Amino acid sequence: MSRVYDRVALIGLGLIASSMFWAIKRAGLAGEVTGYARSEATRDTARRIGLCDRVCDSAAEAAEGADLVVLCVPVGAMGAVAAEIAPVLKRGATVSDVGSVKRHVIDAVSPYIPEGVHFVPAHPLAGTEHSGPESGFAELFDNRWCLLVPVAGSDPAAVARLRDFWEGIGSNVDEMEADHHDLVLAVTSHVPHAIAYTMVGVADHLRRVTESEVIKYSAAGFRDFTRIAASDPTMWRDVFLTNKEATLDILGRFAEELFVLQRAIRMGDEKYLFDYFTRTRAIRRGIIQAGQDTAAPDFGRSKVKP
Amino acid sequence: MSRVYDRVALIGLGLIASSMFWAIKRAGLAGEVTGYARSEATRDTARRIGLCDRVCDSAAEAAEGADLVVLCVPVGAMGAVAAEIAPVLKRGATVSDVGSVKRHVIDAVSPYIPEGVHFVPAHPLAGTEHSGPESGFAELFDNRWCLLVPVAGSDPAAVARLRDFWEGIGSNVDEMEADHHDLVLAVTSHVPHAIAYTMVGVADHLRRVTESEVIKYSAAGFRDFTRIAASDPTMWRDVFLTNKEATLDILGRFAEELFVLQRAIRMGDEKYLFDYFTRTRAIRRGIIQAGQDTAAPDFGRSKVKP
């Protein structure tokens, strides 16, 4: 794989940015990668572990002269970061992001993008429950989707270049419209996280009843939920607040559906339960056939650093 | 590890029984292991893959002369199987089971246990989303809990021997009272499964809106739910119908909690969301410290046959 950008800047150095860095290095996609994190402790960690060729002490310093600037901060912070880097952006540069919500990011960032700079929002569908600069690994995006969400007037050449970049990182790349993205992600990611957080919250109350047993005997099911619910709190607070409409829509449908299941249990409706549980198996088969899960342990999410 | 029982009979040859067989062989816990499954196709498969030393054509034939008979059928079928094998049970034998619900199994099976036969219910907290005789592997129970739920008048020697057996299979063994077991499992397993099934059901409806995208872009969160929701439909129908009271209690608490979260999203209550998501992380840490999850990929659930 050859170089796609001379200089890449990663703003925010958590799981996604650190994984991007190792993947960029693995494939030789950039000449120099600069990085910035708001927290001094994170910057120190990054310097210690060799994350980024140069760790800068401001977002503007990291972004200055970059051919690609990727905003890897929580969705709620994207606008402020865009405002900060806007004055130093190089003519012809591309600004992108990795936020889990796209309409809000477009609305927040677009006003700050200067004339002659390309804005191409993106969302790599990959993650683990770990966060921070030390949680990244080069393989995180391998064979996962990265959705590009071009805005009105996005330069096709800039979009194509960003696609080359994400393919070089290991992703499959597709394009999607912003509002549609936010609905699909509400179903596949945002509401499942809300539900997992809630179930873990219920168990937290019950700990006072069952003491440590809920944890000690945590079986499959709950254990998987706790893994989902261990994800970064700031990131998820922002996701729910900035994709409010779709999240509430899907949560409403979920509550309805749950009440129907609850009623079937109460009424002892054997046939309903059996048929319902049989149908859900088919969806699982669809996911395996679509290549979004594997027999490979842990979805290939093990931390393996280069 | 030395022999604990001369003859063990496994009634029902799904994931749990087949994993037990490979673990029994791995540790040399029994002289002969007989097996029976209601479906002729399952019995044929068992014979083909060498599952059980002897596959019998009736439950009674398999149970006759056994020192330990383990009922590995769905919870709703336990009573009928107990009735079928009761006449052939050897004096001094132990009958046990692996059901996910204990009060119902005790009520359904106890009346059929003959004088001089010991009944010691059990529940190994282990599983995968796969089912059937070919899904088993010897390591399934390694370092997982197996809960023994002795009934009034259970012979301490019979309980101790079953404990040796499960420890030989690889489990950590603990004892618990039946109703308490059913409440703890409702929290850690039964309601999480109900929720996962429901979320997958919601996505199923939405597929008509978003076509194949829900599957194609299934991210972490939903993907984990589909794995949970791919579990055996008969088993789970029976779990919900036979642990109805605890399941409905916990489902009710869950719905309340979800509405509070939903309201916080609607109201844009940043602090509530951040604090809530932060608290759930602590539970996850507790589970890792309790040894119920590992950094090891896939919870060590890979299929590795001896």
Image: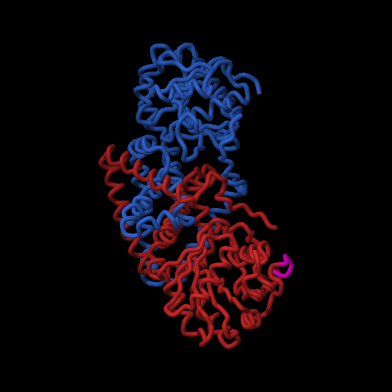
Chain colours: A red, B blue
Horizontal and vertical percent position of residue A209 = 46, 48
Horizontal and vertical percent position of residue A36 = 64, 75
Q: Main secondary structure of the magenta part?
A: helix
Name the image quarter holding the N terminus of chain B.
top right
Q: Which residues are magenta?
A: A46-50
Q: Which of the 4 quarters of the picture holds residue B75?
A: top left
Q: Is residue B272 above or below residue B225?
A: below
Q: Nearer the viewer, residue A176 or B8?
A: A176
Q: What residue sits 41% from the left and 14% below the top?
A: B60
Q: What residue sits 60% from the left and 74% below the top?
A: A11
Q: Nearer the viewer, residue B211 or A225?
A: B211
Name the image quarter holding the C terminus of chain B.
top right
Q: Nearer the viewer, residue B254 or A237?
A: A237
Q: Is residue A212 visible?
A: no
Left or right position of B135 against A169: left
Asked if residue B172 is among those painted magenta in the image, a careful observer would answer no
Q: What residue sits 61% from the left and 65% below the top?
A: A20
